[in-house]
């Protein structure tokens, strides 16, 4: 007897709305990302005249899934890493579906596991110097309300090392102010919470921003909003960040040498500067909300640029040894043994 819940859409619905949030405990952003993958798959199949309610597991062959991933890369301009994320979502669902209806989903599962992840070449992480951060924080025109808001956003990004989504999610209740600074409660990836302290200067800016916008007694209000939303979106924050980086590049062509600086560059910069200031890796790990120390270890590599710079300057100060006295002795050594 056929299981009434064996259809593609039925299992996908339970995967998205029950399995991921309840059994896995996936974050809202993860679920949102998974939903988007399957919307893309449905869009791809619609282009082949297959309506969403007509999708069957038997259709999801190796050839079709491969064509879908190629379509993502060529038509949707997905990067290899994004393409791999899409494949991971399909792989997760295929395992879930097969466990609940082996006969129906086995073709889909066997097709997915045959497709390899695409090799991703790591890009160099764009990190600001301390001077570049200082320059960037002074770019907004603070005589305008939007300019002051933007300065507060940039300062908070650097002071907290928070991700773009974490900045957008902040509410007034997440701050506790004191005479020496502020404590900030951040909810990060996977719903993991962390509590960090931020500098007094950034705290003073935040207090002034909250006072100007009459948010002091509105604990449930989001800290940052846009002209159209009571909660600032990531795309809005990205646009703000891009605006001031572009302006800083034009005004200071001798600085900002990387081709692009995404908002995450500020988080990288915070961590790198903390490490260079002597803050232990384990402290930086907790500050950033990393699950493992291995994730934080990348900043030790980033700061190697600073180490190399200082070593280069140091080596220039050394004198060149006089090697003329060793010429005769060197000539006695066979060429193949010389170093």
Image: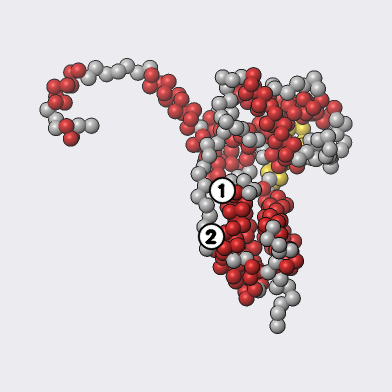
Relative to 184, 295 lies left or right: left
Report crowding for label 2: few under 14, some 14 to 19, many 20 or more residues within 10 A (C-alpha).
some
Examine the rendered structure and indicate whether residue 182 appears above or below residue 31: above
Specify the quadrant of the image occupied by residue 46: bottom right
Report crowding for label 1: few under 14, some 14 to 19, many 20 or more residues within 10 A (C-alpha).
some
State the SS at label 1. Answer: helix
Which residue sits at x=84%, y=42%? 220
Image coords of residue 44 (percent x, y) = 67, 57
Observer-nearest residue: 226 or 184?
226
State the SS at label 2. Answer: loop
Image coords of residue 177 (percent x, y) = 77, 32
Q: Which residue is mark 1?
A: 80
* Quadrant showing the C terminus: top left
* Quadrant showing the N terminus: bottom right
Residue 38 in view, yes or no = no
Which residue sits at x=63%, y=49%? 75
- Indicate the colouring scheme: secondary structure
Between the C-alphas of marks 1 and 2, the distance is 14 Å
Relative to 100, 221 lies left or right: right
Image coords of residue 135 (percent x, y) = 64, 22
Q: Which residue is mark 2?
A: 115
Observer-nearest residue: 253 or 208?
253
Residue 83 in view, yes or no = yes
Image coords of residue 148 (percent x, y) = 77, 25
Observer-nearest residue: 66 or 24?
66
Relative to 272, 248 lies left or right: right
């Amino acid at each position: 007897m056929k299981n009434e819940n064996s259809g593609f859409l039925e299992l996908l619905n339970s995967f998205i709305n029950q399995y991921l949030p309840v059994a896995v405990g996936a974050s809202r952003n993860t679920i949102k990302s998974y939903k988007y993958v399957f919307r893309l798959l449905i869009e791809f199949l619609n282009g082949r005249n297959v309506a969403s309610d007509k999708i069957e597991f038997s259709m999801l062959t190796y050839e079709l899934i491969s064509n879908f991933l190629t379509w993502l890369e060529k038509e949707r301009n997905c990067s290899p890493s994004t393409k791999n994320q899409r494949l991971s979502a399909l792989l997760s669902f295929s395992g879930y579906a097969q466990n609940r209806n082996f006969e129906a989903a086995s073709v889909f599962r066997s097709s997915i596991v045959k497709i390899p992840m695409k090799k991703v070449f790591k890009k160099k992480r764009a990190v600001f110097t301390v001077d570049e951060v200082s320059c960037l924080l002074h770019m907004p025109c603070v005589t305008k309300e939007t300019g002051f808001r933007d300065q507060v956003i940039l300062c908070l990004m650097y002071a907290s090392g928070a991700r773009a989504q974490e900045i957008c999610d902040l509410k007034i209740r997440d701050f506790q102010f004191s005479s020496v600074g502020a404590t900030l409660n951040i909810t990060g990836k996977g719903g993991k919470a962390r509590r960090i302290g931020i500098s007094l200067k950034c705290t003073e800016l935040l207090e002034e921003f909250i006072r100007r916008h009459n948010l002091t007694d509105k604990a449930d209000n989001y800290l940052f909003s846009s002209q159209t939303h009571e909660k600032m979106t990531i795309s809005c924050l990205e646009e703000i960040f891009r605006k001031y980086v572009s302006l800083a590049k034009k005004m200071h062509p001798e600085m900002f040498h990387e081709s692009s600086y995404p908002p995450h560059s500020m988080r990288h910069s915070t961590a790198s500067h903390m490490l260079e200031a002597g803050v232990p890796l384990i402290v930086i790990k907790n500050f950033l909300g990393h699950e493992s120390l291995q994730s934080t270890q990348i900043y030790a590599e980033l700061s190697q640029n600073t180490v190399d710079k200082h070593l280069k300057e140091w080596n220039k100060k050394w004198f060149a040894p006089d090697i003329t006295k060793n010429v005769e002795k060197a000539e006695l050594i066979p060429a193949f043994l010389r170093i």
